[in-house]
Image: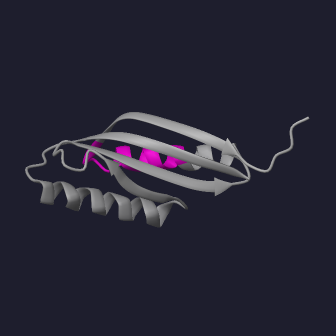
Amino acid sequence: MVVGVIRFDLRLHGIQSLKQKRSVIKRLLNQLRSLCPVSIAEVGHNDLLQRSILGASMTSTSEALMDTVFRQLESIIEKSGTVEVIDTENEFIHYGEKFS
């Protein structure tokens, strides 16, 4: 079993209030949840108008499958037109594998 996590550091454009930011982020999260088999939430920069950090995770049998899904997430975020991906960081943790 492999657990994968990814963090997206985002810059939001044209945001005038926290209410507007939360609306944009909520819409984006709902879109990502509906299109990809991940758990995803806003995990940082909650009180900054122009920034947000999203964290996503999933469990699978292979890193390759998760890497494909994580690239799909990034593509959807970039195509949303409301945010810019500044940085991403991912990690894969393997469980239950026997090493010689």
Is residue 14 in the magenta section?
A: no
- Residue at 52 percent across and 59 percent down: it is 38
Q: Give the range drawn in magenta.
A: 70-83
Residue 20 screen position, x and y as percent:
14, 57
Residue 68 screen position, x and y as percent:
60, 46
Q: Which residue lies furthest to the right in this view?
A: 100
Count of numbered badges drawn on the protein = 0
In the shown orientation, is residue 70 left or right of residue 49?
right
Main SS of residues in magenta: helix
- Residue at 53 percent across and 53 percent down: it is 57
Measured along the vertical axis of the image, is residue 48 above or below residue 19?
above
Task: Tell me the colour scheme of the image.
Answer: one colour
In the shown orientation, is residue 1 left or right of residue 72?
right
Is residue 75 in the magenta section?
A: yes
Q: Quadrant of the C terminus?
A: top right
- Residue at 33 percent across and 58 percent down: it is 28
Residue 58 screen position, x and y as percent:
58, 55
Task: Give the image quarter of residue 9.
Answer: top left
In the shown orientation, is residue 13 left or right of residue 94?
left
Q: Which residue lies furthest to the left in this view?
A: 16
Residue 80 screen position, x and y as percent:
32, 51
